[in-house]
Image (cartoon, rainbow, N blue to C red):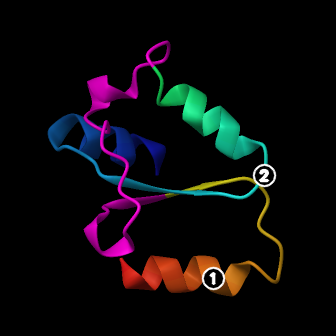
Amino acid sequence: SFEKVIGLARANSLWPLPFATSCCGIEFMATMGSHYDLARFGSERPSFSPRQSDMLLVMGTIAKKMAPVVRQTYLMM
């Protein structure tokens, strides 16, 4: 749940893996900027390696063709 993610973010430093498919990826880049400051939750290091990340952030619409790729990325975590 969202409350567990917030609690995990407050307790530990998160290394999220961004998975953006459409314009939602641009919105995510804006949240990582200085205006919204996600660094206060300890997530200032977005990891682009599935084996080094703690949480998978999926932004955008996932089609049926893309679902196996998202699943494989999640399993590599």
70 inside magenta stretch: no
- Report x, y in % for residue 52: 27, 67
* Highlighted range, magenta: 34-56
- Calculate the distance from the C-alpha at mark 1 to the C-alpha at mark 2: 15 Å
In the image, residue 54 above or below residue 10: below
Residue drawn at x 50%, y 78% as measured from the top left: 73
**Which tag, 1 or 2, sits closer to the chain's start?**
2
Q: Which residue is drawn at 35% across and 56% down?
A: 47
Query: What type is the residue that disc 1 sits on?
Result: Val
Please tell me the numbered disc located at residue 69. 1
Q: Is mark 1 on a helix, strand or loop?
A: helix
Q: Quadrant of residue 76?
A: bottom left
Work out which quarter of the rendered image holds the C terminus and state it: bottom left
Residue 72 pos. (x, y %) = 53, 86
Reading the image, the residue beneath label 2 is 22
> As drawn, is 68 to the left or to the right of 75?
right
Q: Nearer the viewer, residue 64 or 46?
A: 46
Amino acid marked by disc 2: Ser
**Secondary structure beneath label 2:** loop
Residue 3: where, in percent of width, then height?
Answer: 40, 41
